[in-house]
Image (spheres, rainbow, N blue to C red):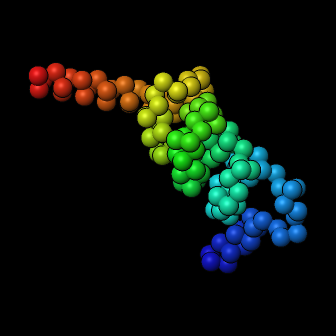
Amino acid sequence: QNLLLLFIHMLYKLLDWIPFDDINWNGLSANPHPEALKWLQEHPEKIFWPNLCYNSHPDALKLLRQELTLNPEKIDWKLLSANSHPEALKLLQLNPEKIVFLQHNTRALNHAITFWKNTQDCRKEHRRKE
């Protein structure tokens, strides 16, 4: 099993002989492999933000959270709405007006329904306390 994991890690390692300018940054931004995220963290100016919005690796979502505070216009809310990672859902919860609902995007719809129910429950609880 360890040999298989080593082989998989080697299979997805970025090749040293590929010129830096020839790297497909669009594809790398969508790649959830830890090595890909390491490269993106080292070269944030090369990130293709729409693809990163759909990337479900936790480090990709950390980069998105940072970018949201600095350059929110880079966030592709349609692709982030389709991202199933819990951290992506937290970002959507902080920006519910940005959620993009598509027929095939049941994740965003389910998240929005849960968010709405929680909001209603909080309002009811608040009214009881008054």
Residue 127 image offset from top left, x and y in percent: 16, 21
* Rendering quarter of residue 59: bottom right
Q: Residue at x 68, y 38 (%)?
A: 50
Q: Quadrant of the C terminus?
A: top left
- Figure check: 37 above or below 74: below
Front residue of 2/61: it is 61
Query: Is 15 displayed left or right of 99 in the figure?
Result: right
Q: Is residue 79 visible?
A: no
Quadrant in which the N terminus is drawn: bottom right
- Furthest-bottom residue in this view: 3
The one of 127 and 46 positioned closer to us in this rendering: 46
Q: Above or below — where is 97 with respect to 54?
A: above
Q: What is the total number of numbered labels drawn onto the structure image?
A: 0
Q: Position of residue 34 (x, y in %)?
A: 63, 62
Above or below: residue 65 compared with residue 1? above
Is 117 situated left or right of 8 in this image? left
Say if 29 sits above or below 107 in the image: below
- Name the residue at 47% across, 45% down: 86
Q: At which x and y percent is residue 129?
A: 11, 26
| Nearer the observer, 87 or 103 | 87
Q: Is residue 62 visible?
A: yes
* Residue at horizontal 65 percent and vertical 54 percent from the top: 32
Residue at horizontal 67 percent and vertical 78 percent from the top: 3
Q: Is residue 94 left or right of residue 73?
A: left
